[in-house]
Image (cartoon, coloured by chain):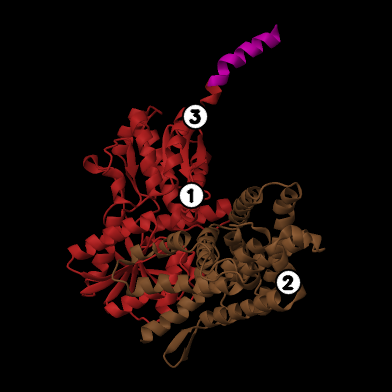
Amino acid sequence: MRNSLLAVLLLFTAPVLAQETIKIGVITDRVGVSKPYSEPATEGIVFGAAEINRKGGILGRKVELLIEDDQSRPDISAALARKLIDQGAVFILSMSLTAATQQQQTVTMEAKMPQMTPMNSGDTLTTQLQNPYFWQTGPLGSIQIATLLAHARAKNLKQVALITDNSDLGQLLAKFFKAGLEKSGIKVVADEVVARGATTATPQMQKIRAANPDAMFMSGVLTAENVLIFKAYRELGLKIPIHSSYNLSVPVYMTVAKGLIDGVTFVDAYDPEKPEVKEFETAYKKATGKDSFNLHGYGYDGIMMVGEAIKRAGSTDKEKIRAAMQGLAYSGVMGAKGMTYSFPEGKRAGYDPNGMVVRIYEGDKQGRVVYVGQK
Amino acid sequence: MQDFLELAVGAAASGCVYGLLALAYLLMIRPTGIINFAVGEWAMVAAFGGFLLLSKLEWPYPLGMAAVLGFMLLVGWATERIAVRPLVARGAPLIAPILALLGMLVIFREIVSISFPPDPHPVPYAFGIGRLDFGLLGGSYQSFFIIGVTLLVFAATWLFFERTLAGRMFEAVALHRRAAALMGINLFRVTALSFAGGAGAAGLAGLLVSPNISAHYQMGVPLAIQGFTALVIGGVGRVEGALLGGLLLAFAEQLTVRYAPIPSGFAQGVPLLFLMVFLLVRPTGLLKARA
């Protein structure tokens, strides 16, 4: 009799216990082209979720991450978004490539599921689809070029070269870079592409040398191909200044392009002197025993913003979370000192246009901030 | 003119890498008829071997290179024993080992992808970063090193097939497997040696190119395609065809990017165009096997 009573009690309480956690879906890339970026950013999410849980969770409930791998493939990313919705996720964080994130939106828009990408930089994510349930907090490509241009403006550039790779994102960023440069009255005298899997970038760099530009802008995102560019630059004895996209902010260049990057300036969303960054790096090291860098910060800020939105919503009701997210103003690890993410006037790209910095490689080390914002 | 000569050295080095990959295909296709697309992944495995021994453990370059090549011979031999021989022994059709080797391609890539962090890893140059000039002809130390090593390998392979009894055995198997077997040639041994040699050639290509492109888990497929295209251009009949195909492909790629009045993005289509033209017009490649 007593056993039967216990069984009945368990039958009624089990669903309540199962609902104890707040499930947040994460779609990342563990084996595809975005793996070098997606993995550390996802580690930042995992660390952030552990921090939230260590401090008591959200609304008295623990956060549970449901992590899926879409290999940055748009054809499977939408199905994974649907799977996460079926599993009870109340928010989805998209951590693979822009094209895959875009594809997930077709599902989240229809299901009215809050979704955010803390790291994608394609400008089109919030403009191609009017999806009120989607936000983007990574620095947009257009902000990157505007910041780089503002920094370069003082140098009185008249004509520049542009070089990229043939990845989707590399091409997209090159488009933004070119449009921004031409809008500023700077002539693009060489526009080169290094294909994925190339074994040399010498012909492209020879063309750039022949065009005699004042500087070279790099918008590629494939590390190996960018290293090829640096090697050809060095081999051909070029001396023009190099200004790069945020891709050069990934620390791997300090080892894989050793001896090749001194003096290269790059856009970053990370200021190592910012107090929040120092605090984050210390906590991450203490918790994981590993060093963190900017990509970890993207993921960390992402999960923290989601947590904050759910807290402000006061429930896991998706409509309330949407409203809370839209009204959020949040200062985190990423961005220049004092930067705040916000979504005023219905905007859904929340990175402050003046929140990026330009840093310089000093020797093989990522060095000081040499410029802030785009004013 | 200086531009062209500078480009010629770089293109020749790239062509040599493609040639070595084509040679890897050829060594296996000639005696067995099996196309092994895992050659790109073998190159990747060797590149990671270079990263481990030369970058991490800082072995002397000749010792590290020899160790990696020895390991690759073993990898090739083991691949044949695991993925090819059981199928051939059971009389499976030719497509069966080709599919099994595609499976091995995925296995090699995933093992590396799981075992190493996802970022590209540096592999040192044999003679450091530097430039060598002979009058107008100039290029990096590594370019000249790649060209030198490749020429040695092709010369040795040519001599092996033309001047040694073992090489003649390979040719006999390539001409007629059943007749060769009836003459007392051990077919399994020839197949195993061809896979070991193929892995050695592919591994050498990976090791030589990795200081430029770094060791990363996605480097295999582009190399496999470039090597295959070089093989189609040069033909599977003769060793020197592999090198010729590689050089033609690399020069076509790089001269198009540098001099053709088209955006460099479009120049990426050149290898594909070459592949299609040769498959349609001259599927046997430029050099035919000797009668």
Residue drawn at x 59%, y 63% is: B44
Q: Amino acid at mark 2?
A: Arg
Horizontally, is A127 left or right of A293 in the view?
left
Q: Amino acid at mark 1?
A: Gly
Q: Nearer the viewer, residue B50 or A94?
A: B50
Please, is residue A276 above or below residue A182 in the view? Answer: above
Q: Nearer the viewer, residue B286 or B272?
A: B286
Estimate how packed mark 3 is, as few (under 14), some (14 to 19) or many (20 or more) residues with alpha carbons within 10 Å.
few
Q: Which residue is mark 3?
A: A87
Q: Chain of mark 2?
A: B
Q: Which residue is mark 1?
A: A44
User: Which quarter of the figure has residue A185?
Assistant: bottom left
Q: Which residue is mark 2?
A: B168
Is residue B18 inside the magenta stretch? Answer: no
In the rendered image, residue A44, in percent from the top left (x then y), is placed at 48, 49
Q: Chain of mark 3?
A: A
Q: Chain of mark 1?
A: A
Q: Are marks 2 and 3 in contact (CB under 8 Å)?
A: no
Q: Colour of chain B?
A: brown
User: Which quarter of the figure has residue A15?
Assistant: top right
Q: CA distance from mark 1 to mark 3?
A: 23 Å
Looking at the colours in the rendered structure, which chain would you say is drawn in red? A
Q: CA distance from mark 2 to mark 3?
A: 64 Å
- Direction right: furthest residue: B184
In the rendered image, residue A306, in percent from the top left (x then y), is placed at 40, 39
Point out the stretch of residues depicted in magenta: A1-15
What kind of element bears circle 1? helix
